[in-house]
Image: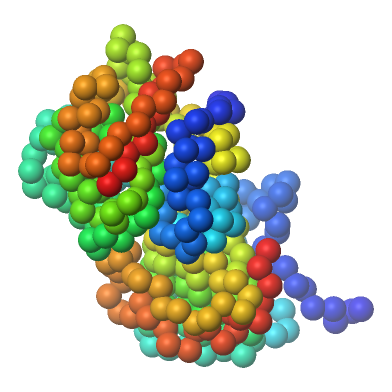
Amino acid sequence: MWNKRKEEEYPPKQAPAPQQSYSSAPTMSSSTAPTYTPEAPRGMAVIGKSVTIKGQIYSQEDLTIDGEMEGSVELKEHRLTVGPNGKIQAGIKAREIVVLGQIHGNVEASDKIDIRKEARLVGDIKTSRIVIEDGAYFKGSIDIMRPGAAAEPAPKPPATAAAPSQPRQQPQQQTIAAQNAVK
Amino acid sequence: MQSQVRNSNGLEQFFYSLQGRDNLSILDLSIANQDNVTFITNLGHRIYTEDVIDSIDEVFGADKEMQSNPVRIDMFLNQALNFPENHFDGALVWDVLQFLSPTAAQAAVDRLYHIMRPRSYLLCFFNANEKIDVVPTVNYRIRESKTLLLSSRASRQTNQFFNNRAIEKLFQRFESIKFFLTRDSLREVIVKK
């Protein structure tokens, strides 16, 4: 019990006072930014807000990105959390994705994607379940994956293709999707 | 923020028209919200959301003259309605056209014609009260196939008043237009390509 893993890094959306931690908009000055300090429980990696990464991330544990990332992110069986300071320009694949910051790129969550208030996501989404809080900005398409659905590449409009670094087609995407139940 | 539940025969007719067809692509020109995403994806369709009001503000700003500027209109179309030809089976346009200048509104409708498939449908709302030129900007949230929850974002000046004749002229390239009488000051229109 002492080592019980902390499952939820972020309070659920009904949490009484989330504002003081991370929900206020980040400012240009990091010193005046809200005191969001992602903890790293066992089994979760954290990329802090002063870190910038260009390239590919492949993780076999839950990951929080609160810095900047450009390239691709893959956590097939795990959860990705984009912290309030996180800015990602990448194609993303994960089991579950929680967005509090910004994502520009196509996103695939085999289980669930949760776009929180103040978050910003521009790109196409494939997922089994989705939650969009009021106040979140989303531009793109949402494709709900049904259990047993055959892999079919969705026709993609160019409107949300502004992220040039990541291709919209993601070849190995359907294998996990078919195993997951729809809400 | 004030909210109001409203029955919409236009909405019901819109989804009735798409009945029996699966895996359609539906364009929703309001701010992304959970209700619309859930409703449309539960029907087995794919939803595309595009907050056109946000694009209007971003591209044209507060200066109304900008809405007559061809360069700005192009920018607006490329930002808000940049989709391939014949891409959508249905579009929930809501009331956004009335916030555009006549030139910009016509350009937007022409672009919609381009990106909609044959046999596709548009649902549009227009303020029906000629005496009012400031109307609330509303988020349209689909509760049921004929019920909407309207939540106000802010008030905004309309750029033009659309009577039936003006609406027919706006959509003259489309195959048919159907008007729905309502008891309030919203004119509901279904347009078929």
Rendered view: B82 above or below A178: above
Left or right: B9, with A147 as reference point:
left
* Visible residue check, residue A25: no
Work out which residue is located at the far left of the displayed protein and give it.
Answer: B70
Q: On the rendered image, what quadrant is the N terminus of chain B found in?
A: top right
Which residue occupies the extreme top position in the image?
B131
Percent position (x, y) of residue B154? Answer: 42, 28
Residue A66 percent location from the top left of the image: 51, 70
Q: Residue at x 89, y 79 (%)?
A: A2
Question: In the figure, B79 relative to B171: above or below?
Answer: below
Q: In the rendered view, how is the structure colored?
A: rainbow
- Residue B38 versus residue A166 in the image, above or below: above
Give the number of callouts.
Answer: 0
Q: Nearer the viewer, residue A61 or B157?
A: B157
Residue furthest toward the right?
A1
What's the residue at 45%, 50% (across, down)?
B18
* Place of residue A151 in the rendered image (x, y in percent of width and height, measured from the top left): 49, 82
Residue A171 shows in the view:
yes
Front residue of A71/A127: it is A127
Q: On the rendered structure, is B66 left or right of B89?
A: left
Q: Quadrant of residue A141?
A: bottom left
Left or right, A72 with reference to B7: left
Taking depth in this image into account, of B182 and A140 the one nearest to the observer is B182
Asked which quadrant contains residue B83, the reply is bottom left
Residue located 47% across and 16% down the image: B184
Residue drawn 42% across the image and 83% down it:
A170
Above or below B160: residue B132: above
Percent x, y of residue B52: 33, 44
